[in-house]
Image (tube, rainbow, N blue to C red):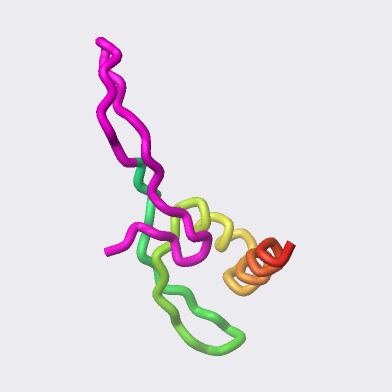
Amino acid sequence: MSKVCDLTGTRPLYGHNVSHSNRKTKRRFNPNLQKKSFFIPETGEWIDLKVTAKALRTVDKLGLYAYIKKLEKKANN
């Protein structure tokens, strides 16, 4: 299963665990992905998406259709 948000495209970030002795080992910061079903009233369909918790909060605030339009506008600029 890929760890990518279907709406924002957020991917895992990479960094280091740093011990007390300042030794660095590789680690991975995974996004907080949730599986969620959304109803789109404009089309009358349900869709299943994997979205981050941050994107889910924004979708709850704006609505899915408005959020997708906002993302498209941001991508065009």
Q: How many marks?
A: 0
Relative vertical location of residue 14 with respect to residue 65 in this rendering, above or below: above
71 vs 18, nearest the viewer: 18
Q: Residue furthest top?
A: 21
Please check the rendered image and state whether residue 12 is part of the magenta-colored stretch, yes or no.
yes
Give the image quarter of residue 49.
bottom left
Relative vertical location of residue 6 with respect to residue 54 in this rendering, above or below: below
68 vs 26, nearest the viewer: 26
Please check the rendered image and state whether residue 11 is part of the magenta-colored stretch, yes or no.
yes
Question: Which residue is at 45% across, 82% downward?
Answer: 46
Return the x and y of residue 19 as percentages of the image width and height.
26, 17
Return the x and y of residue 71 as percentages of the image width and height.
63, 64
Q: Which residues are magenta?
A: 1-28
54 vs 3, nearest the viewer: 3
Q: Residue furthest right?
A: 77
Return the x and y of residue 26 as percentages of the image width and height.
28, 33
Question: Which residue is at 47% across, 74% downward?
Answer: 38
Return the x and y of residue 70 as percentages of the image width and height.
68, 65
Relative vertical location of residue 72 with respect to residue 44 in this rendering, above or below: above
38 vs 76, nearest the viewer: 76
Q: Is residue 14 left or right of residue 74?
A: left
Main SS, magenta region, reads loop
Quadrant location of the C terminus in the rendered image: bottom right
Question: Which residue is at 48% across, 87% downward?
Answer: 45
Q: Is residue 72 left or right of residue 50?
A: right
Quadrant location of the N terminus in the rendered image: bottom left
Question: Which residue is at 61% across, 86% downward?
Answer: 42
